[in-house]
Image (spheres, helix red, strand yellow):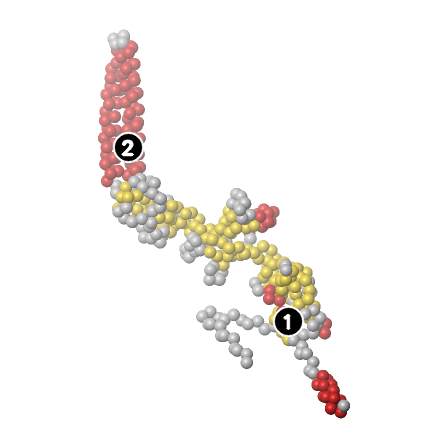
Amino acid sequence: VLVIAGLGLVGCRKETAKPAPSVPVVETVQVVQRDVPVQREWVGVLDGLVNATIRPQVSGYLVRQVYKEGEKVRKGQALFEIDPRPFQVALDKAKAQLSQQIARHETAQANLARIRPLAAKNAVSQKDLDDAVGTELSTRSAVEGAQAAVEEAQLNLGFTKITSPVDGIAGIAKTQLGNLVGPSMQDELTSVSTLDPIKAYINISEREYLNTAAAGKQVEQLPLQLILGDGKIYPHPGRFAIMDRQVDPTTGTMKIGILFPNPDNMLRPGQYGRVRATVRMQQGALLVPQRAVSEIQGRYLLAVVGAENKIEVRPAQVGARIDSDWIIEQGIKPGEQVVVEGVQKVRPGMVVTPKPFQSTPPPSPGQAASPPSEKR
């Protein structure tokens, strides 16, 4: 009996000596209220203002490439040359046929000039006069046809020098010297694109289009930025330029064209970027870091540190994203503390120890981030 009583006293002492559970430490930030610009971003694809596909208009062997690939060319500048000799021969032949037709027409005119006064005196028959008139008209039309043939031959000879129709940057040639080229060939000779200004195409949703249509002229005055593939902001702002005639029924989007100045031709067709527009200014917006917002089954939740450091989990209505922050439309008040680090380990009514959130600054360019130290 004494042994059992002693064991019971030892057990009671161990139970009374059990330590209290530790209070979790969480990092919090204060809800900030300020005026912020509400921005939208779309993925854009760059394209030339004018993209001229260079194709031959006559068939022949390519004998010269005049331009330097990837360099600026002017309107009317020669790019390629097709062997002109067959076309020069065709022009000379057409000119010879024109001379023959002119000689026949002059003979017919002379005959008509002799017969017309004789017919007035009834010295020749009316049929002779009609034949002379018909011959003159026939030879005149033959002269006109021969003249058209000469002009056609001259055009074809001119087409042997393939020129640029626009100012721009010429692409890499897609054919080689000595190849037989012609209008029916599948590949073009090259392309010339006008790059200043350059176009950026984006696709907006049908709802965004309706908002754009309602805004009217105000859309053309929206400040537009281009964020390049390396994350840098292009220094020249863009402007709204064109809108497609229809909404694509397969995607429910509409194509929009935006023009950006490109004085140094740094931007090239085919590049990708993000087009950012400041659509409006929101007065007195409540901001919290995006990492403080939890999404569960389509609901957004915030862990708020209330009185006596107790956790209160509230549903929140979120708005636009501003950099790394999120606008909260409903659910919090200015000055309240929300949990940023440790959201997963808190529960409603739990007492926590809050401390200010310390954000880690991003590493400077060219400096690798140090690996996290191992906990022992």
Furthest residue in direction bottom, as rendered: 2
Q: At numbered mark 1, what does the secondary structure look like: helix, strand or loop?
A: helix
- Report which residue position mark 1 lands on: 345
Which residue does the image show at 23% across and 24% down from the upper left?
Answer: 103
Q: Return the x and y of residue 353 as percentages of the image width and height.
A: 66, 76
Q: Which mark is residue 150?
A: 2
Q: Is residue 339 visible?
A: yes
Ranked by sequence position, the earlier of labels 1 and 2 is 2
Q: Residues within 10 Å of mark 2 (few under 14, many from 20)?
A: many
- Locate residue 148: give its quadrant: top left
At label 1, the amino acid type is Lys
Residue at x 31% of width, y 50% of height: 67
- Residue 98 position by quadrant: top left
* 202 displayed left or right of 91: right
Name the amino acid, label 2.
Answer: Val
Count residues near mark 1 (Cα–Cα under 10 Å), then give few for <14, some for 14-19, many for 20+.
few
The correct choice, above or below, for 323 with respect to 119 in the image is below
